[in-house]
């Protein structure tokens, strides 16, 4: 049975592979993969900050495409585009609100009258 840690490691590995493909082949090939990875991050309960850590880790392992005359700035711009696309599912998911901390008995009730307390 996969653990949360195993799933995070798998996501991180898949992110690096997809990011490398994005840098080498461009967004036409990797747009859907970026959205898929963002969806996987949502399923794991990750926040944008968590994905930033994964992205930063991947950037340290990223290599320039073989034979490509790509500057560091171009590589970083392509990587930023991938990262931004990966965030779309996370940013589109409403935050999970914590359960109410009040006990029903603690909620004041309106004494006789209508719901606005008018007698």
Image (tube, rainbow, N blue to C red):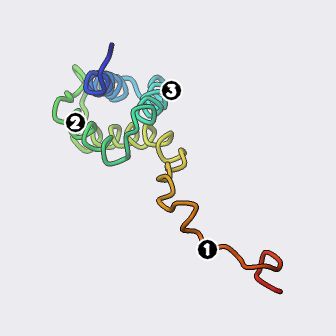
Q: Residue at x 16, y 35 (%)?
A: 60
Q: Are marks 1 and 2 in contact (CB under 8 Å)?
A: no
Residues packed near mark 1 inside 10 Å, few (<14), some (14 to 19) or many (20 plus): few
Q: Which mark is residue 108?
A: 1
Q: Earlier in the sequence, mark 2 or mark 3?
A: 3
| Cα separation between marks 1 and 2 | 54 Å
| Residue 86 image point, x, y percent | 43, 37
Residue 46 position in % (x across, y down): 37, 40
**Which numbered dot is residue 32?**
3
Residue nearer the viewer, 82 or 6: 6
Q: State the SS at label 1.
A: loop
Numbered tag placed on residue 59 in the rendering: 2
Q: Residue at x 49, y 42 (%)?
A: 88
Instruction: Count neighbours of disc 3 (C-alpha within 10 A) and say few if under 14, some if 14 to 19, many if 20 or more.
Output: few
User: Which residue lies at the image location 35% right of the left edge and 38% below the top edge?
Assistant: 78
Write down the quadrant of residue 51 in the picture: top left
* Sequence-first tag of 1 and 2: 2
């Amino acid at each position: 049975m996969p653990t949360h840690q195993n799933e995070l490691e798998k996501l991180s590995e898949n992110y690096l592979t997809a990011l490398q493909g994005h840098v080498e082949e461009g967004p036409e090939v990797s747009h859907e993969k970026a959205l898929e990875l963002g969806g996987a991050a949502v399923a794991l309960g990750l926040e944008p900050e968590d994905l930033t850590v994964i992205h930063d880790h991947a950037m340290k392992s990223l290599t320039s495409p073989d034979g490509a005359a790509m500057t560091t700035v171009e590589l970083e711009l392509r990587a930023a585009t991938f990262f931004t696309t990966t965030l779309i599912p996370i940013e589109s998911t409403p935050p999970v609100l914590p359960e109410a901390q009040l006990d029903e008995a603690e909620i004041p009730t309106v004494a006789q009258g209508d719901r606005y307390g008018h007698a």
